[in-house]
Image (spheres, rainbow, N blue to C red):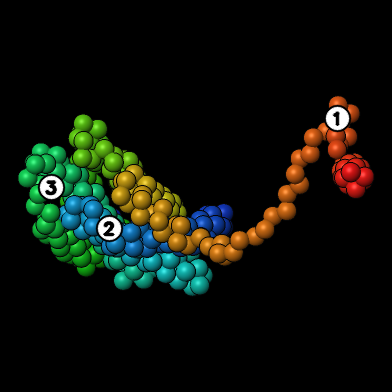
Amino acid sequence: MSSNLTTTTTQQPQEPPQIFINIAYILSILELIIHPFILSISLFNLLILIKNNILHQNLRVLLIGQSLTIILFETQREILVSQKIVSGDILNPGFITLQMIAVFTVSCEALLGHALFLERLIAFLFFKIYEKHNKPYYGIIANILIFVYSILCGFTMSKSWDITPLLILQLFIGILANFAEILLSENIRTSNQLFPVFICHFIRNLSIPIVAIEICLNMPSYIISITFILVYILGSSLNGIIELIIITHHPSLKKNFIKIIQLLKFRKPNRVDVLKENVALPRTINGNPLLNSNEFEKTFFHVKRCLELI
């Protein structure tokens, strides 16, 4: 979390109990396991989006920006958590540069969620004109503005625990906006497929104020550090859900997804195998063959003898 104001809440270093250190290590190892999976899903989704030409260009550009942001977030967290484990100080916030990247990605993800809803709202209100003009102007401009603002948020932070009135206002407006988007998206035909995505953004925005409240209450630093880890695990899991929803809830993306899966499967060799099958012969009521080979031979032998006598 970050802001460009100077009012901050100072945290006094406290010696954490061993049980909290153990919990932090367990959660951090869980993070190391989760992030590669989410990263793989995001890379796969990015490949599908780049190859897809059916989506409207604005929606496609925004979804590509979202996938790139998630990829950066997962990579940053994997590096940061690894660094904390190697250093032996698991409750340390980590390198300031990696914290700045975290602020950048979290800000991007939140704003891209709003940009996606606005794009779907425009597509609904002006659907006759919007579908004819398939140009990515809105998507490109929105991505640029979001990236610039998020970069400024990252560079202006002094530490990851900055709590200011501006940040609190940002969180409050973001939660209200997500709630309104969820209510409206149910009645907007063009955003029905992204409805679960808006719910994921709403849940993620609800988790961030928990950390802000702990900082304002001057909770012990190790409690805040563990809460940060939990929030990041939740955020990473929601990232994976968002990417899977985008792949599976849109018909054209789902079709491309199935095609790629089929290409990844091992193909069977083009060889025709001759299968020997037993022909079912007629049987008696006792289950014995009605005719056997010996009876056939005897029958033909008698026919042959009759022909010779004639």
- Where is the C terminus found, in terms of image quarters? top right
Q: Secondary structure at mark 1?
A: loop
Relative image position of residue 272 (x, y in whole percent) = 61, 61
Relative image position of residue 65 (x, y in whole percent) = 24, 60
Label 1 or label 2, whichever lies nearer to me, is 1
For image coordinates 32% across by 41% down, the residue present is 196
Q: Is residue 75 above or below residue 185?
A: below
For image coordinates 40% across by 56% down, the residue present is 259
- Closer to the chain start, of discs 1 and 3, is 3
Relative image position of residue 23 (x, y in whole percent) = 54, 54
Q: Is residue 96 above or below residue 182?
A: below
Residue type at mark 1 is Thr
Residue type at mark 2 is Asn
- Closer to the chain start, of discs 3 and 2, is 2
Badge number at residue 52: 2
Q: Total of numbered circles in the picture?
A: 3
